[in-house]
Amino acid sequence: MPGTSPEAPNALGVLASLLEARTGQQLAANRSWRIDTALRPLLAAENLPDLDALVWRLVETNGQRLAERVIDALLNQETSFFRDAGVVENAARAVETAVAERGSARARIWSAGCSTGQEPLSLAMHFAEAGGPMPELIATDVSNAALERARAGRYSQFEIQRGLPVRRMMRWFDSVGGDWVARPELVRAVTFRRHNLVDEAPPAGKFDAVLCRNVLFYLAAPRRAQVLEKLAAALTPGGLLVLGAGETVIGQTERFRPSQRFRGLYERVPDDAPPRDCLRLAV
């Protein structure tokens, strides 16, 4: 691999292990090239020649801040506004329907693994434009760097054009120095917090919906099951779970089932629901 020493494969293993220990995310062996690519800017900033030197710096200094920068660089922060052809708006409409039927005054929604904030800000735009009550929107991520960007609400021209039509862009963002900055009332609608899905308890209180998209994909099966258990505990009975297009709860947990009312979503199984074996016998 260009620019690395003969010991670099060991360094790759150390860095992949650091990512998994801190976030639960695994990096497949055939994607180890991502480590070298993602960390090149950090190597340059720290004036380090290769990944071995970075690992030695981490070991010698026990550098927590440097380790956090490594993790931030390795995390896949791919996201966009209103990502995946209407998923956000469909989920928001499902929440509106469910909450109205329960007679609740205000919905609570958790965007878990929110990255740089496009998903929760998309939700805020939808609810503001719908004209009903703005739900309590909690957005969390393990990356402090991503959360700083989310709280600033500042996006490049490329980022703002991904998923946002011109009408929404002009209504909710202002052009500042070549970037686009979300208006204060939009950012204020979301509470951004640092949170580790693997190691920490969910935010306090029950939620009507949790969006956790393209996070479980990177977790090993045991940790995936643990996270699904936490998400179930965070939801009201019948609460909705939104996963990424390539993710499913089927075969991974008994706490969720595909929603029969809201296509593509999952709902939390009530605590008093009979086991699936009983359901099959009753049919």
Image (spheres, rainbow, N blue to C red):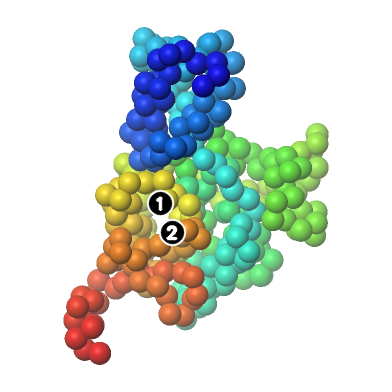
In terms of secondary structure, where does tag 1 sit?
helix
Q: Amino acid at mark 1?
A: Leu
Is label 2 in contact with label 1 (beta carbons under 8 Å)?
Answer: yes
Q: Residue at x 55, y 41 (%)?
A: 77
Is 249 left, or right, of 35 in this rendering? left
Q: Which residue is mark 2?
A: 247
Q: Is residue 43 above or below residue 192?
A: above
In terms of secondary structure, where does tag 2 sit?
loop
Quadrant housing the C terminus: bottom left
Q: Amino acid at mark 2?
A: Glu
Observer-nearest of 97 and 157: 157
Q: Residue at x 72, y 56 (%)?
A: 164
Q: Which residue is mark 1?
A: 216
At label 1, counting other C-alpha atoms closer than 10 Å, the crowd grade (few under 14, some 14-19, many 20 or more) is many
Q: Residue at x 46, y 69 (%)?
A: 265
Observer-nearest of 238 and 127: 238
Task: Tell me where residue 147 appears, x and y as whole percent.
Answer: 54, 39
Is 251 left, or right, of 106 in this rendering? left
The answer to which quarter of the image holds residue 133 is bottom right
Task: Tell me where residue 233 appears, x and y as whole percent.
Answer: 31, 59
Is 268 left, or right, of 114 in this rendering? left
Task: Tell me where residue 212 appears, x and y as whole percent.
Answer: 45, 55
What is the C-alpha distance between the residues marked 2 and 1?
7 Å
* Viewer can see residue 127: no
Q: Is residue 145 above or below residue 4?
A: below
